[in-house]
Amino acid sequence: MTDDRFQRTDFNFRNLSAVSCSPKPGPDPGPDPGPDRDPGPAPEFGFDAPFDRTGTGSSKWARAGAPGVIPMGLADMDLPGPPAVAEALARRARHPAYGYTVCDPAGRTLVADWYRTRHGVEVDPDWVLLLPCGPRTTLRLLLETVRTEAADPRAPVLFPTPEWGGFAQLCRAARAEYRELPLPAGPDGYLLPDAPLPRPATALLLSSPHNPSARVWPAARLRALAERAAEAGALLVSDEVHGDLTHPGRAHPVAVAVVDPALRHRTVTLNSVGKTFNCSGIPSSWALVPDPALRARLTDTLAGYGLWEGGLLEQTVQRAALGEGGPWLDALLAHLAAARTRLTERLGPAVRSAPQASYLLWLDAAALGLPPTDARAALLERCGLEASDGAEFGPGGAGSLRLNYALPGPVLDTVLERLDRL
């Protein structure tokens, strides 16, 4: 399939860190940025150096399946995380008390400060629930909470298509009826639905920015969608785990801040440091829940599953990331924007929507010359690149592929070389 050399890791994993391009004589000067390439972030963060995941049990690299394959499907960055997080974990680990911990109330203020400084919006610290589980678990428990007291428990959960496949999976796990709403497409990418929503409905779920296309939803359209959700009797739940990863020049609309204040009690925003700071392996999240009654009910539901606010490692990571991770994040976003530009220029009309956030690229399989019904396997066979099948994102994803380009510079170089095989 490919003659690129990758280091074999423990068990069945493969490691991208040993990818080799054409050998050069003498000392390695590092990748040549070229006349038109952004030189990237400050070198101390190591985004343009090989990154070794040997021995870490990486789920992403387990998907590779064979030596030489570069996995680009799972939404997980092959880049080093913030030094501040590593240092905070090391400090905490040196104290040999690992028992139950209470929630630090200052963590709520830290989240509110993050939204103020990073996004320019005001979040009441009282809205914040700091949770020792990932956003997926939080959403599952939120669905259970709202369905229990819904006027019609059989009313469906609504979400768009294409959309992150976890929404459908969670609804099935909760035995909740759901309905997928096709997203209309405009010249610049997908648009939020502008027609009345089916009613009655229990909740309207939305990834913001959009997963898989990495589109940033305009604030005005998000506000209008909240109004239509209220008309249908639905709680608007905005999953914003990619919201801090908006590319330079873009602003992320935080749902609880941009909706009509009269509808805040019908709006919940979910977020986490996991995607933003590449630490999803330590599950944590927070929920912005302006309605105090809903906060109390969700807290009760969590307690019923043995989950309470706080968490030893979770709070350690959140404090370090939000308090000290800003410079690292700025450098990361510059790196991602440069990678996005290189890939979108190379793939041209195959890009269904120019990414405005995160590290996801949504592609038209037919425009790549791949069979729409078997594009993932064809890309793997021809190029040694593993992608997410568009069918995983609902009926609207058929014939598409999602690529993750959060890669070190040398590996991205190899990806671009392999795409020439299409």
Image (cartoon, rainbow, N blue to C red):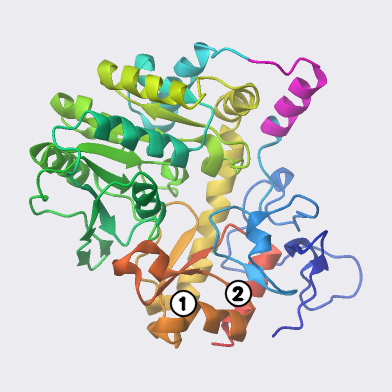
Residue 294 drawn at (x, y percent): 28, 22
Residue 214 drawn at (x, y percent): 39, 56
Along the line of sight, the residue nearer the viewer: 90 or 142: 142
Q: Which residues are magenta?
A: 85-100
- Locate residue 304: give its quadrant: top left
Residue 165 drawn at (x, y percent): 40, 57
263 on left or right of 410: left
Residue beneath disc 2: 385
**Looking at the image, is mark 1 or mark 2 nearer the viewer?**
2
Q: Main secondary structure of the magenta part?
A: helix
Residue beneath disc 1: 347
| Up/down of 150 relative to 376, above or below | above
Q: Please tell me which residue is depicted at 71% across the width and 74% down the height of the picture.
A: 66
Quadrant of the frame with the C terminus: bottom right
Q: Please tell me which residue is depicted at 73% across the width and 64% down the height of the picture.
A: 16
- Secondary structure under the numbered disc 1 in the rendered image: helix
Q: Amino acid at mark 1?
A: Leu
